Image (spheres, grey):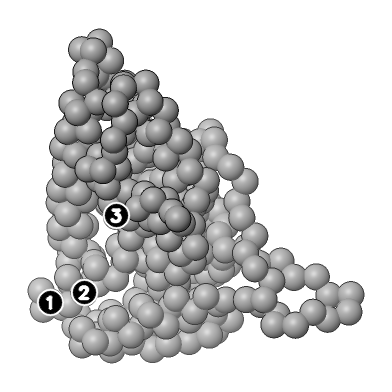
Amino acid sequence: MLTPVEEIIEEIEKDRKSGASTLTDKALECFAVFAEQSSDKTLQTLQDQLLLICNELIHSQPDMAPMFTVTQRVLSCVENLKNQNPSPEKIRKTIKELIHTIRTELVQAKEKIAAIGLSLIKNSDTILTHSYSSSVKEMLISVHKMGTTFQVIATESRPGFEGRKLAQDLGREGIHTTLIVDSAACKLLQNASMVILGADRVTEKFFVNKIGSYSLALCTHHASKDVYVVCDTTKFVPTSFSTVESKLYPDEEVLEEELPNVTVENPYFEEVPLSFIKGVICEKGLLSPKEIGVII
């Protein structure tokens, strides 16, 4: 039987539809449960267990930068306590306080991102987006609730079809949304005021998002329209960020039965050069690609 912490990690690993923000929240919950339920009696055993959890979280979703940045923040916090010769209970308490702090920061980041979105999106705009990003969704809903009237074109985002969920969520909030097949995105770009994408990782050279983002960003760039990326800074990591190799996902998501001499490849994520985008909307402001390089 899996422990509660192991159950959360397994849930994260099997999740193929949620964006990085949702998975970050699950990772924070994993640490909160560990801090609450851990029965380790010595400092060393607690640290060993914590390191194991961090490693498993990073491997559970290797393309998601917050799995790295959040785990490193937890480990650094514990490491900083070493000189105080803390008790296991002290470490558990410190982890709980850190998780609360991170969650508060993420809420504040959403509010700041929404404010930037309000200044960017105008009445009668049409926003084209791809895949499902909770950061994009929450910004659009916030802008809508503050009185701006706009429309959204959303790709269905094969093979997981998470774009359908985005369209459903936006529609329920009263935002008129047109759902399209992925391959129609570049054609319908002519109807869009701008493209807004989420990101699972942002480096000084590129951002990582759902497969199909590169071609959409390239088409938008050549059409002289703007691409914006929406995310908080937990997704900022240097290009040298070392992680396990990106996954290929199940063949049956693309092809239900085997065909002679046919091989399936099903990557979920790809890198998109920052040179294709206008900027990144985050809690630090609307940052240009050059400014991203300075911050990271």
Q: Earlier in the sequence, mark 3 or mark 1?
A: 3
Tag 2 near tag 1, CB within 8 Å: yes
Closer to the chain start, of discs 2 and 3, is 3
Tell me what residue is drawn at x 54 percent, y 35 percent.
Answer: 242
Residue at numbered disc 3: 25
Crowdedness near tag 1: few (<14), some (14–19) or many (≥20) residues, C-alpha within 10 Å: few
Distance from disc 3 to disc 1, alpha carbons, whole Å, reads: 24 Å
Q: Secondary structure at mark 3?
A: helix
Q: Is 67 placed above or below 242 here?
A: below
For label 2, the residue is 141
Residue located beneath label 1 in the image: 145
Based on the displayed image, in which of its 4 quarters is residue 234 positioned? top left
Residue 105 visible in the displayed image: no
Residue 145 at x, y percent in the picture:
12, 76
Crowd band around label 2 with a 10 angstrom C-alpha radius: few (<14), some (14–19), many (20+): some
- Which numbered tag is attached to residue 166? none
- Residue 205: x and y, percent? 50, 43
Q: Which amino acid, by three-letter code, is at mark 1?
A: Lys
Q: CA distance from mark 2 to mark 3?
A: 20 Å
Given residues 270 and 50, the one toward you in this image is: 50
Q: CA distance from mark 2 to mark 1?
A: 6 Å
The three-letter amino acid code for the residue at tag 3 is: Asp
Image quarter where the C terminus lies is top left
The residue located at (34%, 40%) in the rendering is 70
Disc count in the image?
3
